[in-house]
Image (tube, grey):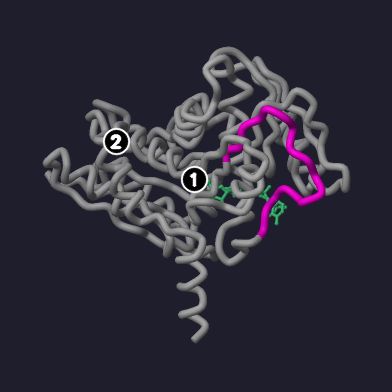
Amino acid sequence: MKMRLGLIGYPLGSSYSRQLHEQALKALNLEGSYQLWEIPPGPDELEELTSRVEALREGKLGGINVTIPYKETVLPLADRLTPAARTIGAVNTLYREPGGNQVMGDNTDSPGFWTDLQQLLPPERQKGGGSALVLGAGGAARAVTYALASRSWRVTVAARRAAQAEELAADFRDLPGSVWPVPLTSRDGPSTTGCGLIVNATPVGMAPGLNLSPWPDYWSFPRGCVVYDLVYNPRETSLMKQAGEVNLPVRNGLGMLIEQAALAFAHWTGQPPPREIMSRTVRRQQTTFSQIKDQQQKQKE
Ligand code: NAP
């Protein structure tokens, strides 16, 4: 039977998910398709979301990814949540329980981030806790902070709305690590003593703000830290350039994107995901800073 997969969100114009999953299906000789289901926010959104989840429950769909702005909205539509999805408070993958008809909600962003982070962390920091600074306190910051704090890291979360960081810290208070909320607005910047990892979990650095960085020029980077930017388009963000200039190891979020998709694919198909093919597919799509600038210029003309 053909497997019908898809992504719910709005807008979806720049999503790589279709190519990623269709190439993965093809690689495993599985018949199926992955569609982009744009649901504009409005009075009908809940009805549309509910009908997609119902189609999954009935077996008419094989799996659903969820992105902005519905990662929290779909939470109560699932029959059961994984512990990660429940604590993070966001679902990016819905699948039917193997052998049953209950709809499970999971958050694969969090393990996707952790797995890819291992490519950047020095070996001595891969086990046990460290100290990290996460910029932003939205859905992705929650997934990242969960990955770290559930592994005993001490995480400082810096957000421009202090209340958002405080709520995140309160929700994660029972994890083995610790979470400290701070404002992102101070001229001096957050304290980074002992910080070994900086993560950008804001959208700053994506088009149209390619020249922007969440790290103001007048803040200094802690010595010996590594910098992970969840943004993956452009390939090298302004934050990565700044950190690279002071010789800090950097990594963009493309590996996390691939890994979260691979974990979703495994839920839906029950098969080991073809990571190498998924990786090759998205790396082909990725653009450089100057290519995006050229596209923007053409759109203006
Ligand atoms: P979100 O829920 O909207 O949260 C964004 C966070 O960034 C909020 O705390 C927001 O604060 C803050 N923010 C936005 N603009 C800012 C600015 N100019 N200065 C300072 N803070 C700012 O979005 P999200 O789902 O967490 O996604 C965040 C980023 O991660 C996006 O770029 C997304 O594409 C990326 N992401 C990547 C992956 C991956 O696989 N690599 C996975 C998930 C997300 P306010 O609420 O005050 O605006």
- Residue for badge 2: 275
Task: Look at the image and give the residue range highlighted in magenta.
Answer: 212-228
Element marked by disc 1: loop
Q: Nearer the viewer, residue 167 or 286?
A: 286
Along the line of sight, the residue nearer the viewer: 210 or 25: 210
> Is residue 224 magenta-colored?
yes
Could you say where residue 55 lies in the image, as x and y percent from the top left? 30, 48
At x 75% / y 44%, what residue is drawn?
Answer: 159
Quadrant for residue 30, please give it. top left
Q: How far across and how far down the image is residue 297, in percent?
A: 51, 78
Contact? badges 1 and 2 (CB < 8 Å): no
User: Is residue 173 in view?
Assistant: no
Q: Nearer the viewer, mark 1 or mark 2?
A: 2
Label 2 sits on what residue type? Answer: Arg
Q: Position of residue 127 (x, y in %)?
A: 55, 14
Q: Is residue 283 above or below residue 117?
A: below
Name the mark on residue 74: 1
Where, quadrant-wise, is the N terminus in this rendering?
top left
At label 1, the amino acid type is: Val
Does label 1 point to a residue whose CB lies under 8 Å from ligand 1?
A: no
Q: Residues under labels 1 and 2: Cα distance? A: 27 Å
